[in-house]
Image (cartoon, helix red, strand yellow):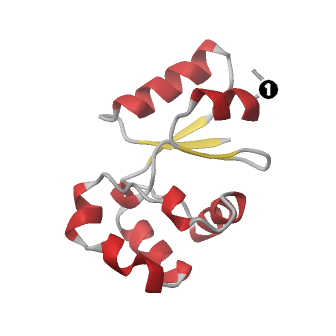
Amino acid sequence: MKIYTYAKCSTCRNALKWLDERSISYQNVPIRETPPSNAELKRMLNAQEGNIRKLLNTSSQDYRDLGIKDQLDSMKPEAVFELMQTNGNLVKRPFVISKEIHLTGLKAEEWGKAFGQ
């Protein structure tokens, strides 16, 4: 399982703590330096029932500066993925992906259900 995080993000630190407390193994990947691959973004989009907003860090300054909110409805997923892969700050974090688990953000109820806790 991979978890994409940003070291200065308190939500990401809390997510890692949550996993560590439950002895759940993971590969921590720095999201800004190594954003999720195109294949991972596609899998996550499918898991989020096609809702691309669930993959985006809508609170980031980069998201606002690029005006993505106003363009998103007319953008193809591939164009959004390209932006996300060139700017990892646009990806909702933490971003957790494995064969069975597809999570964005940290919501205790969703995480508990996904990890059988």
- Give the image location of residue 88, x and y in percent: 38, 58
Label 1 CA crowd tier, 10 Å (few <14, some 14–19, many 20+): few
Q: Residue at x 44, y 68 (%)?
A: 85
Label 1 sits on a secondary structure element that is: loop
Quadrant location of the N terminus in the rendered image: top right
Residue reaching furthest top? 21
> Would residue 83 be found to the left or right of residue 81 on screen?
left
**Residue at figure coordinates x 68%, y 17% from the top left:** 23
The quadrant where residue 72 appears:
bottom left
Query: Residue 13's x, y, as percent?
Result: 42, 27
Q: Mark 1 belongs to which amino acid?
A: Gly
At 68% from the left edge and 24% from the top edge, which residue is drawn? 24
Residue at 73% from the left image edge and 44% from the top image edge: 101
Residue 115 is drawn in which quadrant? top right
From what the image shows, is residue 52 above or below residue 29?
A: below
Name the image quarter holding the C terminus.
top right
| Residue 28 x %, y % | 53, 38
Q: Nearer the viewer, residue 49 or 18?
A: 49
Q: Is residue 115 left or right of residue 76?
A: right
Give the residue number, with chain letter if any, for mark 1. 116
- Give the tally of numbered discs: 1
Looking at the picture, does residue 90 appear above or below residue 42? above
Q: Quadrant of residue 58?
A: bottom left
Along the viewing direction, whichever of 96 and 65 lies nearer the viewer: 65
Estimate the x, y position of residue 18 in percent, counting from the top left: 56, 21
